[in-house]
């Protein structure tokens, strides 16, 4: 399971969103068993957590250049 988690962390945000869409289709399928639904939901939540961590990292790195050309923290 640790390999799977590492794999999700290596995905780009775009790839992660595409995978989340695939998981959503599985959950919406009426033929998906309860056990499969639970496992798919769990995988999706781990992927969402990974996406949130990536977005937090990007947000922290964002900077804005002021009029003098100096870097300052992104407001917000």
Image (spheres, rainbow, N blue to C red):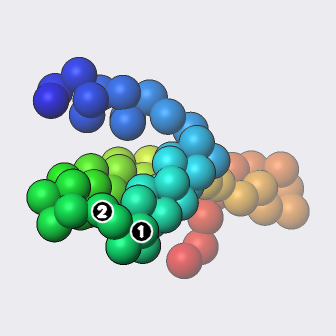
Please name the residue shown 85% across and 56% down the image. Answer: 68
- Residue 3: x %, y % from top left: 23, 22
In the drawing, does residue 72 fall left or right of residue 2?
right
Q: Secondary structure at mark 2?
A: loop
Gap between marks 1 and 2, in whole Å? 6 Å
Neighbor class of circle 2 (other Cα within 10 Å; few <14, some 14-19, many 20+) is: some
Q: Mark number for residue 59? A: none
Q: Is residue 56 visible?
A: no
In the drawing, does residue 2 fall left or right of residue 71?
left
Residue underneath mark 1 = 29
Please name the residue shown 44% across and 29% down the image. Answer: 10
> Between residues 74 and 16, which one lies in front from this camera angle?
16
- Which of the 4 image quadrants contains residue 6? top left
Please name the residue shown 77% across and 55% down the image. Answer: 65
Q: Secondary structure at mark 1?
A: loop
- Residue 73: x %, y % from top left: 57, 60
Residues at marks 1 and 2 touching, judged by CB atoms closer than 8 Å: yes
Residue underneath mark 2 = 32
- Which of the 4 image quadrants contains residue 24? bottom left
Quadrant that contains the C terminus:
bottom right
Quadrant that contains the N terminus:
top left
> Between residues 32 and 62, which one lies in front from this camera angle?
32
Please name the residue shown 13% across and 58% down the image. Answer: 35
- Residue 55: x %, y % from top left: 48, 56
In the figure, 22 relative to 6: above or below?
below
Neighbor class of circle 1 (other Cα within 10 Å; few <14, some 14-19, many 20+) is: few
- Which of the 4 image quadrants contains residue 32? bottom left
């Amino acid at each position: 399971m640790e390999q799977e988690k590492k794999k999700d962390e290596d995905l780009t945000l775009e790839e992660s969103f595409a995978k989340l869409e695939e998981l959503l289709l599985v959950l919406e399928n009426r033929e998906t068993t309860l056990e499969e639904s639970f496992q798919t939901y769990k995988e999706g939540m781990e992927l969402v957590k990974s996406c949130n961590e990536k977005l937090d990292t990007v947000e922290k790195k964002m900077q804005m250049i002021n009029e003098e050309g100096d870097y300052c923290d992104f407001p917000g």
